[in-house]
Image: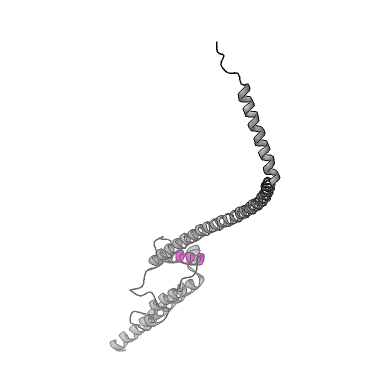
């Protein structure tokens, strides 16, 4: 067999072996991704940095736990894993994997640590918003209670003031009626007395009384003891 044909067959055999190994590794990664990263951490995968806290697998597991604890991200984590596996198995010259919807682990995409940090910040903000909403709700309830108390107290005070005013008006009306009746009686008495004094008989009686008073005064003046002379 010529050397060129032997080299060609050897190269094709190496390519087939590499393709088989790559497909086998991709299948193992897909199986681990479908089973979940947490199961890999429990069973112990053959990755050398799987137990490292700063490794991508640990960060990915932490991100998945945070995602399950909170609401899911707009970016599906399963799509991220599938896109990473597809880009790794496609080879450096395969450009079709970069155009697939699941292939998001590009050079400009954020790392898993950055995504985890952003998620933690979002969770902290949500907790802060929950606390602020609870505080505002409590303050609103307190304000509504105070407004209700003020309204009830104001209504009670207003009703009391209205009752007092009505009572005072009734008393004033009764006093005014009594004053009018008393004035009417006094006016009638004065009118009768004036009419009685305005008659000729009354005038004659008054003259007699005045004459009698004058006589009494003269008598008293005459009978008053004067100073004694020697």
Q: Is residue 50 among what the camera can see?
A: no
Task: Inspect this view and state whether residue 222 appears.
Answer: yes
**Which residue corresponds to the image point at 46% horizontal and 74% vertical from the top-left?**
76
Quarter of the image containing the C terminus? top right
Q: What stretch is highlighted in magenta?
A: 60-70
Asked if the stretch drawn in magenta spans residue 118, the answer is: no
- Image location (x, y in percent) of residue 102: 43, 78
Residue 28 relative to residue 94: left or right: right
Vertical placement of residue 13 versus 223, above or below: below
Q: Which residue lies furthest to the top in this view?
A: 230
- Is residue 141 or residue 166 the one in the foreground? 166
Q: Where is residue 108 in the image (x, y as percent from the top left)?
A: 33, 73
- Is 146 in front, or is 45? 146
Side of 109 where 221 appears, left or right? right
| Residue 66 highlighted magenta (yes or no) | yes
Q: Which residue is drawn at 28% across and 88% down?
A: 4
- In the displayed structure, does residue 18 sit left or right of residue 207? left
Give the dominant element type of the magenta stretch: helix, strand or loop. helix
Determine the image quadrant of residue 216.
Answer: top right
Residue depicted at x 62% and y 29%: 217
The furthest residue to the front: 230
């Amino acid at each position: 067999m010529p050397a060129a044909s032997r080299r060609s067959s050897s190269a094709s055999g190496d390519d087939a072996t590499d393709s088989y190994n790559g497909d086998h590794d991709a299948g193992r990664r897909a199986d681990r991704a479908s089973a979940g990263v947490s199961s890999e951490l429990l069973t112990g995968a053959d990755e050398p940095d799987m137990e490292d806290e700063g490794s991508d697998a640990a960060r990915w597991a932490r991100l998945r736990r945070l995602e399950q604890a909170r609401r899911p991200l707009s970016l599906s984590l399963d799509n991220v894993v599938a896109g990473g596996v597809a880009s790794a198995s496609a080879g450096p010259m395969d450009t079709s994997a970069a155009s697939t919807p699941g292939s998001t682990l590009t050079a400009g995409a954020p790392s898993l640590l950055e995504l985890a940090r952003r998620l933690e910040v979002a969770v902290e903000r949500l907790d802060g918003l929950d606390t602020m909403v609870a505080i505002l709700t409590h303050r609103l309830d307190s304000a509504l209670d105070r407004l209700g108390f003020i309204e009830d107290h104001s209504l009670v005070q207003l009703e009391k003031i209205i009752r007092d005013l009505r009572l005072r008006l009734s008393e004033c009306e009764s006093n005014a009626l009594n004053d009018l009746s008393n004035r009417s009686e006094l006016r009638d008495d004065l009118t009768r007395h004036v009419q009685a004094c305005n008659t000729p008989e009354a005038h004659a009686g008054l003259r007699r009384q005045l004459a009698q008073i004058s006589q009494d005064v003269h008598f008293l003046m005459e009978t008053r003891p004067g100073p004694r002379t020697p």
